[in-house]
């Protein structure tokens, strides 16, 4: 049905054109108010992030060291991503082209959503629309963040993975370029495990060789840029595995002051809680896989549904454990949600509840900044009772637990993918063959 196929990108296009008209021809105060209601702090002009990356090219062409500070950027931000982008500064684009590049990038992004697996019923359509029009996605589009460019590249990787070997290798090459631009997309290359052992080894060696050449050429610049990667408080829109344990550790350290054991208490609490959370995630993953029903539901997905579920899960989980990521990186949930909703069509009631519930949690996470800032504004109202201030902590705790649950489900998807891969089956067959031969060896020995 055309509504399910094109309803989501159509709604995205309407919102984008509406906000663009409001900024260009309407009341910019209303434009900024809408962003504020969404949980996005207005900057004053759109496409801020792609403007910063274009400023890198502009100043690099002038011989400026843009890693520490970039005078061509409106905020003088330093550049902390890959030096490969700087190496492409010969492309004749600069800050003056921000609007054109931002428009083009966002329109291609919106159009690319039509290549994702389509919803099949009204409930799925509503949930996918809620994800597409969420704070995380609107934030990425309003800033024209380069992650949108990487999203498009990775989407192309997933589409090419459905065709013959030469096209799949082209897709892996695109994923490699994305990884060399911003590092975290390296997790997308987990899909190489879909290949036969011989192809897997050949492609892996080629990818490793490219990574080795890149490191040999740019390791100095990479080390310099890593210090500029964004970090911040544990209670904002930054998502990471360390948010929950580290903030609780800080609270424990504050409670232990002025004892000389303050730092030790903080480290023990943070480390212990982190280990508990990881252990709980592993236990959830193990339990879901042992039932067999989830694995059967995943196996029933179409190739595209399963592939994008794996890709989205790999990127989100990788970012979650690698360090703090700004909320707009949640755009990769767009790849994972269609697969989760497809699992909710399973015959097992438990699996339906699991996948549908996880999809709802993802929707809430993607709107999280809208909820958080709305709650904070309400509690800061002069008439708000002081006793309700604890709602901030409760909201933060529920949000972080929601992240850990979602990541646990995504890890389950990834483990199932790896376990069902040709490489795993080949290793298992070699291992079983070795065990079957060992009794005869023992008999001959005695």
Image (tube, helix red, strand yellow):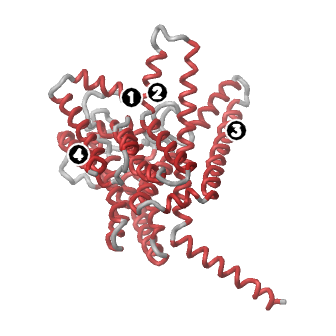
* C-alpha span from label 1 to label 4: 23 Å
Which quadrant, please, contains the C terminus?
Answer: bottom right
Mark before the other along the chain sequence, 4 or 2: 4
* C-alpha span from label 3 to label 2: 29 Å
Closest to the camera, between mark 4 and mark 3, is 4
Q: Secondary structure at mark 1?
A: loop
Q: Position of residue 288 (x, y in %)?
A: 61, 53
Kindly identify the residue that appears in the image at 45 percent across and 47 percent down: 226
Residue 338 versus residue 138: which sits nearer the camera?
338
Q: Residue 76's quadrant in the figure?
A: top left
Q: Are marks 1 and 2 in contact (CB under 8 Å)?
A: yes
Mark before the other along the chain sequence, 1 or 4: 1
Q: Are marks 4 and 2 in contact (CB under 8 Å)?
A: no
* C-alpha span from label 1 to label 2: 8 Å
Q: Which residue is mark 2?
A: 372
Closest to the camera, between mark 1 and mark 3, is 1
Q: Which mark is residue 107?
A: 4
Q: Position of residue 247 (x, y in %)?
A: 59, 32
Q: Which residue is mark 1?
A: 39
Residue ranking furthest to the right: 446
């Amino acid at each position: 049905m055309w509504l399910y196929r094109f309803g989501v990108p159509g709604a995205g296009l309407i919102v984008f054109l509406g906000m663009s008209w409001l900024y260009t021809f309407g009341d910019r105060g209303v434009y900024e108010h809408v962003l504020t209601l969404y949980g996005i702090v207005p900057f004053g002009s759109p496409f801020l992030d792609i403007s910063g990356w274009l400023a890198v090219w502009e100043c690099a062409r002038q011989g400026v060291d843009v890693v520490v500070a970039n005078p061509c950027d409106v905020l003088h931000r330093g550049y902390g991503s890959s030096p490969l982008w700087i190496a492409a500064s010969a492309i004749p684009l600069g800050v003056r082209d921000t609007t054109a590049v931002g428009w083009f990038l966002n329109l291609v992004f919106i159009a690319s959503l039509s290549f994702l697996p389509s919803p099949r019923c009204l409930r799925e359509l509503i949930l996918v629309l809620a994800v597409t029009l969420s704070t995380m996605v609107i934030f990425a589009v309003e800033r024209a963040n380069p992650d949108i460019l990487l999203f498009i590249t990775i989407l192309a990787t997933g589409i090419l993975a459905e065709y013959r070997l030469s096209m799949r290798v082209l897709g892996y090459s695109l994923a490699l370029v994305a990884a060399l631009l911003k590092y975290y997309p390296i997790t997308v290359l987990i899909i190489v495990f879909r290949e036969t052992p011989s192809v897997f080894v050949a492609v892996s060696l080629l990818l490793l060789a490219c990574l080795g050449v890149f490191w040999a050429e740019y390791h100095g610049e990479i080390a310099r840029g890593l210090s500029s990667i964004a970090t911040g408080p544990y209670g904002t829109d930054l998502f990471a595995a360390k948010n929950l344990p580290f903030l609780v550790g800080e609270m424990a350290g504050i409670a232990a002051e002025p004892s000389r054991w303050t730092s030790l208490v903080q480290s023990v609490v943070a480390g212990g809680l982190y280990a508990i959370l990881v252990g709980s995630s592993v236990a959830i993953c193990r339990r879901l896989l042992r039932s067999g029903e989830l694995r059967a539901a995943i196996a029933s997905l179409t190739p595209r549904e399963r592939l994008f579920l794996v890709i989205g899960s790999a990127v989100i989980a990788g970012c979650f454990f690698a360090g703090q990521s700004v909320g707009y990186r949640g755009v990769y949930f767009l790849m994972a949600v269609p697969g989760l909703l497809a699992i909710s069509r399973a015959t097992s009631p438990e699996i339906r509840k699991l996948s549908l519930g996880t999809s709802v949690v993802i929707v809430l996470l993607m709107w999280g900044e809208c909820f958080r800032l709305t709650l904070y504004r309400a509690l800061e109202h002069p008439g708000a009772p002081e006793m309700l201030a604890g709602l901030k902590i409760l909201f933060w705790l529920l949000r972080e637990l929601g992240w850990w649950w979602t990541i646990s489900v995504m890890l389950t998807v990834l483990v199932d993918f790896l376990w069902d891969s040709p490489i795993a089956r080949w290793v298992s067959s070699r291992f079983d063959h070795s065990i079957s031969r060992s009794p005869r060896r023992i008999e001959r020995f005695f």
